[in-house]
Amino acid sequence: MSTAALPETEVLAQRARTALERCGLARLPEPVGAAGMARTPITGQYLFPVEYDTPQSAGRAVGAAQETFASTWRETPAPERGQLVRRFGELLREHKADLAELVTIEVGKIRSEALGEVQEMIDICEFALGLSRQLYGRTMPSERPGHRLMETWHPLGVVGVITAFNFPVAVWSWNTCVALVCGNTVVWKPSELTPLTALGCHSLLRRAAEDVGAPADVHRLVLGEAQVGEALVEDERVALLSATGSTAMGRTVAPRVAARMGRYLLELGGNNAAVVAPSADLDLVVRGSVFAAAGTAGQRCTSLRRLIVHEDVVDRVVEGVVGAYGQLRERIGDPYQEETLVGPLVAERAHTAMRAALEQAEAEGGQVLAGGARCLEKEAPDAYYVEPAVVRMPEQTDTVRRETFAPILYVLTYRTFEEAVRLHNDVPQGLSSAVFTQDQAEAERFLAASGSDCGIVNVNIGTSGAEIGGAFGGEKDTGGGRESGSDAWKAYMRRATNTVNYGGELPLAQGVRFL
Ligand code: NAD
């Protein structure tokens, strides 16, 4: 456990105000109506009040975004729209440290991870700028003489973006930068746990819009709890709802958007595993697993939660991981300290869930090999710091099959590769996966159609830490959505198929004759 004293809440509140000021929010508006409280998991205490929206004011934000879409943005040339994200990327570079400060204060991420999250925003700005000149449609040979067949891509309208606490700025930027260059306008409902990072981002994007002459209402921010998100879910003017969070949230949201024939894009919970084959480089396994399982205090959607190890090497892998966790124990605490590797859990409910999962795992025959204890309870009774836990399980029980959003790594064993793949896929979620092996055929089998059933499938690298260039998302209970790179932009546009007759005759397709 880190021995450095935790910062005082007042100091953190002042740091947050300074970062917000630097991002352009000279003074936070005094809440007049419904107010929420910004909070820091570093001490577990409240910072200051922020004004919440109501479903009615969220509706007005959607109206303004819809009006901007219809009156200007959809017909602004895409490369010109790209200038908005170019400028936004410049401002993010300038204010990288300020936004990272807010991420650390509100989520408790260690400094390098908070800076890395803002870097991811800068990366997606660059990607989206390039994309603004590459929204390609295809042309296809027509079967009719004198005809041309092609497709064009058009924006959808207002994109509603609902985000989770754990990537409070990156996931929003994947959605928003791509949605904006595609010609949509955006209304964002961030997690109620991270209103300050959202205010900082919104302020910088607004400044970018001013600087390039884009309309202010290309982006609107609405703050509040689930009921404000529900206003976006129910609003027919929200053409696409992109929602990131728990599977339970997705199950509520998806049928309601579908009932109004809206589109949705879901990025939900994961239960990610790595298969460790006997040929694996065990040093790589240990280092890759410890970062993936304990980094961000196990609060990444791609966090490693299951290690499925061949029985011939399980003792060595466990020894390595438990040894590394022993070193981690000295490095839990204040995320501002250079030496800290594990910051706090976001809130009490995460700690309660972790305790319950550990107890249930033990009742199912599991053996806690490392960690699990709460730390710094005296110094910060309202904060929840924990030692990341490793639990050896006799089989893949109900507890293992659930996502517990906390640092618990379950270790399971296998004998045959088929058994490993079966265990791997036998969970409801399908986000990220990895195999550690030096056997090329085994790696290929994991990547093949009958291998991992996840949206992200890695070889000799852990499950977390994706780059923005690839499409990000997962299958089954993870929701099926894809965001960020590759051709994920297509989810933010509608496709029109066009047949153009330049021949002067009217031949019908498939040889049909009429009149
Ligand atoms: P959460 O489900 O509690 O909340 C996510 C967001 O949904 C918040 O903004 C919340 O206010 C909103 N919300 C909740 N109920 C709603 C409703 N009925 N209607 C509209 N909005 C509603 O999730 P969390 O605790 O903030 O985040 C952790 C979860 O998110 C984990 O399960 C994690 O795996 C998942 N996650 C997934 C990805 C991914 O890309 N797959 C990324 C980050 C987090």
Image (cartoon, rainbow, N blue to C red):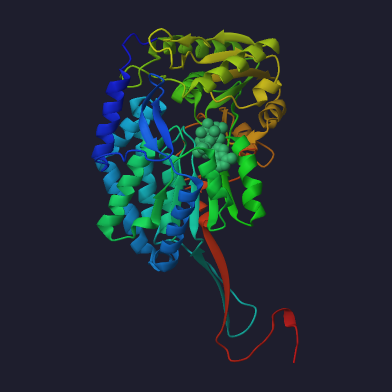
Picture layout, residue 311 above or below residue 127: above
Q: Is residue 291 left or right of residue 139?
A: left
Vertical placement of residue 498 versus 475, above or below: below
Residue that appears at 35% across and 50% down: 126
Percent from the top left, x then y, of residue 212? 27, 59
Res 452 quadrant in image: top right
Location of residue 177 in the rendering, given as x and y in whole percent from the top left corner: 41, 51
Residue at (53% x, 11% y) in the render: 372
- Residue 193, image x, y percentages: 45, 32
Q: Is residue 165 left or right of residue 379?
A: right
Identify the residue shown where x is 27% and y is 32%. Answer: 17
Residue 306 can be seen, yes or no: yes
**Which quadrant of the rendered structure holds the N terminus?**
top left
Task: Report ligand 1 position as a quadrant.
Answer: top right
Q: Position of residue 88 (x, y in %)?
A: 31, 49
Determine if residue 365 is in view: no
Q: Is residue 463 left or right of residue 32?
A: right
Quadrant of residue 414 within the rendered picture:
top right
Tell me which corner region of the image, top left, top right, bottom left or bottom right, holds residue 143: bottom right
